[in-house]
Image: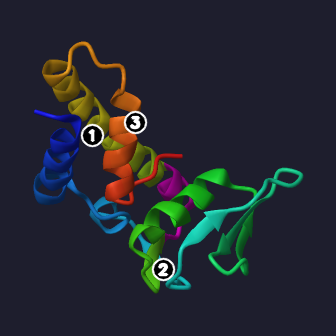
Amino acid sequence: MLEKDFIKMWVEKIKGEFLKNFPDDFLEGVSTSDVDLPGRVLMLGPELFGTFEITDSKGNPYLLTANFTKVKYFLYANRTTPVKMKLPVEEKDINNIVKEYEKYLDSLVTMIEKDFKKNFPESKSFLSVSNHIFGTLNLLRY
């Protein structure tokens, strides 16, 4: 098996068996409100005096907050560029959901790495391969 075949196999495997939708698959039992999104790619801007800015792909400011976990929530939720999302009402729920999602992403990396080492024991390109898999699926881990 070549690395490109390994990448393709894992992309399909994650799409078919493991892919979860953030935030919907992590909101069970949590009180939420609906938030409008721009329907475009959101990007993290620079931190300025402890405040983080999210802009859309046209450079328009979208969100300004001191809570980096909230920034991550918005960026994770915007993976498929929806126009609406559910945002937990309680700040602690935002933190818990982001932690749970990041554990999920880390578990994907662990599964991929285990299989990669089994198939390519001498290779040093796991980071590149895993980045390619995540990039193809538009998954990010902040």
In the picture of the structure, the residue carrying the numbered disc 2 is 33
**Res. 112 image quadrant:** top left
Colour scheme used in the picture?
Answer: rainbow
The correct choice, above or below, for 29 with respect to 38 in the image is: above
Magenta residue span: 88-95
In this rendering, would 67 be left or right of 8?
Answer: right
Q: Which residue in the rendered view is the most extreme toward the top?
A: 122
Placement of the N terminus among the 4 image quadrants:
top left
**Res. 86 image quadrant:** bottom left
Q: Say which amino acid is labelled 3.
A: Ser
In the picture of the structure, the residue carrying the numbered disc 1 is 108
State the CA–CA distance, disc 1 to disc 2: 29 Å
Coordinates of residue 123 in the picture (x, y in percent): 29, 19
Dot 3 falls on a residue whose secondary structure is helix
State the CA–CA distance, disc 3 to disc 1: 15 Å
Dot 1 falls on a residue whose secondary structure is helix
Q: Say which amino acid is labelled 2.
A: Ser
Look at the image and say whether residue 99 sits in the magenta stretch. Answer: no
In the picture of the structure, the residue carrying the numbered disc 3 is 128
Q: Nearer the viewer, residue 29 or 116?
A: 116
Pointer 2 and pointer 3: residues touching (CB < 8 Å)? no
